[in-house]
Image: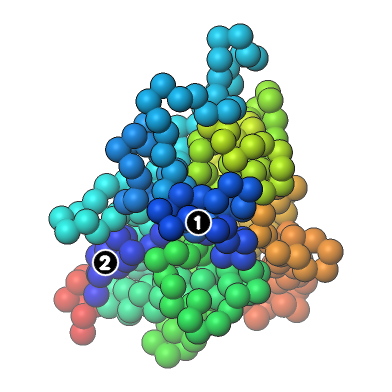
Amino acid sequence: MDPSELSATFTRVAPPVARSAPLGATSPTGGRTPGTEIDRTCVVNSVPQRSDASVLAPALPCGAHTSGGEEREGAATSTGPPARLHSPAMYPVLFYLPGGLPVFGYGLVLGCGLALAAHIGAYLAERSGIPRSKIWTFALIVIAIGFLGGRIHELIIQDALTPAEFLQLQHSGRTAYGGFLFATAGAVIASFALKIPFWKIADAAAPGMAIGLGVARIGCFLFGCDYGFISERWGLEFPYGSPAWYDQVQAGLIPAEASTSLPVFPAQLLASLVGFVLFGVLLRVWYQRPRRAGTVLLLFFLLYGLARSGLEQLRIDAGRGELLGLTTSTAIGLTTAAIAAAFLLVPQLAKLRGDAGEIVEPPPEDKAKA
């Protein structure tokens, strides 16, 4: 089996949308009723509904129009403050397939990240002596469970976990931690069913998880979600209709006619960098062959848990949930980091993981299929 079977999802996965956001009233002609809140779902998925006049202003709200020569409030002027750095982000739809089927930037990048992670994990798993046929079956099971877990966790955070909402895949996002935790649980089940050593294949998968995370956060930047604090010095302005713009309109920080958001720190790019750095660290540790199997996976949860908890302090985007007085991801990150540290440092727990073994040459394909 090949991860190319996942390609069908690329055209159906839209970027995250805060489903709990209040919906706004619209006029019979599709225009927004003055003084009402804006429907964010309409805003971020409005590309097919844009008027000809709005081509230069991506992701305008449904029914929004600009007249020739009209200048929206908030636009830069020659007499105003110095122009800030504008974000090259906000591409919710990259292009359209024949028949008008949209290809979402977030979904395409996420799919590429999953495929890259699967290939890297499969290569390292083969070098651990695991048959190729079992590896790809394992990978597809884990990816599917992780994908569903990310969706479930997202809806739990938004207090919107219903069968009807769960099936609205076109207008949904995924949470990284929901995906990781469900994927880990799925890996335990799949390794038992396929009779392959869990800790060894988990170690092989960990570097791929890190680089997949780094790639996926680029998709977040393309969409403009998961942004950071407001900053004149370090911030980027996201355009009209982006999540940052929407949240600031709802908070009363900018008028609904503003052409851009206030400048916000691009936390997505820092999160992406964290993923790529973790990939390098984990891959080096894997090749060094630590004594105990599972060390690479546990290092991933330890380091990412601490890094994610720090990144959460930089973010101010809405809809992140709360657990134990912290954001959901901060609480999960610190908890998983503590558990991983215990498995790494407590001798009684370390003994449960077995020996990591040596790196081997990939088995011949004909033997792997036998």
Left of 256 or right of it: where is 211? left
Dividing the picture into quarters, in which one does residue 127 lie?
Answer: bottom left
Front: mark 1 or 2? 1
What kind of residue is marked 2? Answer: Ala
The picture places residue 344, in percent across and down from the top left corner, at: 70, 67
Left of 321 or right of it: where is 170? left
The picture places residue 90, in percent across and down from the top left corner, at: 45, 41
In the figure, 266 relative to 146: above or below? above
Dividing the picture into quarters, in which one does residue 100 lie?
Answer: bottom left
Left of 24 or right of it: where is 254? right
Dividing the picture into quarters, in which one does residue 8 lie?
Answer: bottom left
Image point (39%, 66%), residue name: 170
Q: Which residue is mark 1?
A: 26
Q: Earlier in the sequence, mark 1 or mark 2?
A: 2
Viewer-nearest residue: 210 or 20 = 20
Element carrying mark 2: helix
The picture places residue 196, in percent across and down from the top left corner, at: 43, 82
The picture places residue 147, in percent across and down from the top left corner, at: 45, 71
